[in-house]
Image (cartoon, helix red, strand yellow):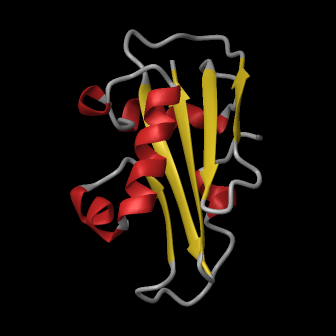
Amino acid sequence: MSLLSVTSFSQVFYNQTSNNLRYAGGLTPQVFEMLDTQERQMLFDCISECGVNKDSVIWIQKSVYDNLTNPDFYHTKVVVKTTSGRNSGSNIYDGFNTLEKPQFMVFIDRYNGETEIRLQMYY
């Protein structure tokens, strides 16, 4: 599990259809509505694995996002779930700074019937 940036994630392009979805950032209600039941459960499992209640997640704020040009700026936990179960897991990266409350960024990649949900918790 390596850290992802929005820039590196966004360098992969494919035709967006109702069957394909590629998104990175703080989760919005519109994006959440695009997830099917299994994908929502995968997201909730990622959040749970971070030790946070799904109702108390703080999605990434601009002030935190702006510091992510340095991948070592914050302590980070990465949790990945896939529909196939392959490449699922978690990893922790040490950083130089801490946040009072953790903030989250989600990377969603649905393509050709396979979905990967990657949740990065900055703390």
Q: Is residue 64 above or below residue 12?
A: above
Name the residue rendered at 33%, 70% in the picture: 34
Q: Is residue 11 above or below residue 3?
A: below
Which sits in the foreground, 63 or 1?
1
Which sits in the foreground, 67 or 8?
8
Residue 93, horizontal then vertical, whole percent: 72, 22
Which sits in the foreground, 8 or 15?
15
Tally the marks: 0
Name the residue rendered at 68%, 16% in the picture: 95
Please tell me in which quadrant of the rendered image residue 102 appears.
top left
Quadrant (top left, top right, bottom left, bottom right) of the N terminus: top right
Name the residue rendered at 71%, 15% in the picture: 94
Residue 40, horizontal then vertical, whole percent: 38, 54
Name the residue rendered at 41%, 28% in the picture: 103
Residue 95 shown left or right of residue 44 in the figure: right
Residue 30, horizontal then vertical, whole percent: 24, 65
